Image (cartoon, helix red, strand yellow):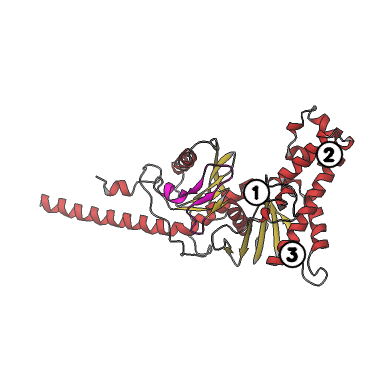
Amino acid sequence: MSTYRDLTAPIGSRRAPVLRTAGTRERRSHLTAPRVPTVGIDIGGTKVMAGVVDADGNILEKLRAETPDKSKSPKVVEDTIVELVLDLSDRHDVHAVGIGAAGWVDADRNRVLFAPHLSWRNEPLRDRLSGRLSVPVLVDNDANTAAWAEWRFGAGRGEDHLVMITLGTGIGGAILEDGQVKRGKFGVAGEFGHMQVVPGGHRCPCGNRGCWEQYSSGNALVREARELAQADSPVAYGIIEHVKGNIGDITGPMITELAREGDAMCVELLQDIGQWLGVGIANLAAALDPSCFVIGGGVSAADDLLIGPARDAFKRHLTGRGYRPEARITRAQLGPEAGMVGAADLARLVARRFRRAKRRRVERYERYERYAQARRERDTA
């Protein structure tokens, strides 16, 4: 039988079911959210990163684990998340957990409808984790959490209308307007990478042809470099020599590194990727008219080698160019930790309910102690 002491034990010293999260309709301003530590989780295809983040976006402690093989059950990944959270909770007074998942998350921010790199298909991630942890849980798409972090603490501070584009293996994205993430009716807004920019173009894993991410992403960059190397093109001799003829060893970071060192082919490939990036941004500007585009993800490490050509192409392809204000295009500031920081900060919006419930537990315990003390004094009188 649970005692009052069990209910008020510090987080991390118990393994009880958690309080349910605040309702999906409950929207609280980040300005009034409690300034308490929360845990952010960033789930990718290769790693699970967890960190305790304070109200100013500072990471107090960070842990990382390899993502279990995608052929394994979703429970294996959930076990990894739980262990990381409980480990951090042993050293920090954590009040909520936010999760940024690489996949489609439903409008209720409970189920991961589809994750391309994990075995999650209509997986009720929030409910499953809520039953195993001691704090409220919030789940969102990882691009949404990264965009939130950049708006709160990074390159998007002060912007009313922001679009974030994450360039990695593919292209993800998010939309923020007036301090709200726009998730769409079904929760899957921001999948910019699957806009069709070249009808009948390269086949995309989504099943369509000519998707934007087939021309401006890490995969596109590596594909073009490997094709030139495979064809034994003279312009590829530098990278062929760099990998000692093992064309399969060519990677995106390697191309960026060689471009910085002046390799002409690698510079040209990044310019091509950047130009396609600018074309897509111009299309998004026509549809959404934001004040700022923030470019994040691993490919953005190329910085001006990529973003310079993107700005040029954006100006050339922008509808009504010369007669309208142009959105600012800037690189993200928070790097690979943006998704984790944003997830933790969004979780802070639901932490108030946990704090109130915890306070009620303490009050009940104090009342019980007063009652017990009175009984003891009466019995000894």
Identify the amino acid type marked 1: Gly
Disc 3 + disc 2, Cβ < 8 Å: no
Q: Which mark is residue 369?
A: none
The quadrant of the picture occupied by the N terminus is: top left
Count residues near mark 3 (Cα–Cα under 10 Å), then give few for <14, some for 14-19, many for 20+.
Answer: many
Of 87 and 370, nearer the camera is 87
**Residue on which disc 2 sits:** 261
Tell me, yes or no, if residue 225 can be seen here: yes
Indicate the secondary structure of the residue bearing disc 1: loop
Work out whether mark 2 precedes mark 1 in sequence or the reverse, and give the earlier one.
1
- Across and down, in percent, residue 247 comes to 77, 31
Q: Disc 3 on helix, strand or loop?
A: loop
The magenta stretch is 106-130
Name the amino acid type tagged 3: Ala
x and y percentages locating residue 280 in the rendered image: 74, 57
Residue 92 location, x and y as percent? 46, 45
Identify the residue shown where x is 64% and y is 67%.
160
What is the distance, in whole Å, between disc 2 and disc 1 at their CAs? Answer: 37 Å
Image spot of residue 215 (x, y percent): 75, 49
The numbered mark at residue 207 is 1
Residue 111 belongs to the span the image colors magenta: yes
Depth-wise, is mark 3 or mark 2 nearer the camera? 3
The mark lying in front, picked from 1 and 3, is 1
Name the residue beneath numbered marker 3.
327
Disc 2 + disc 1, Cβ < 8 Å: no
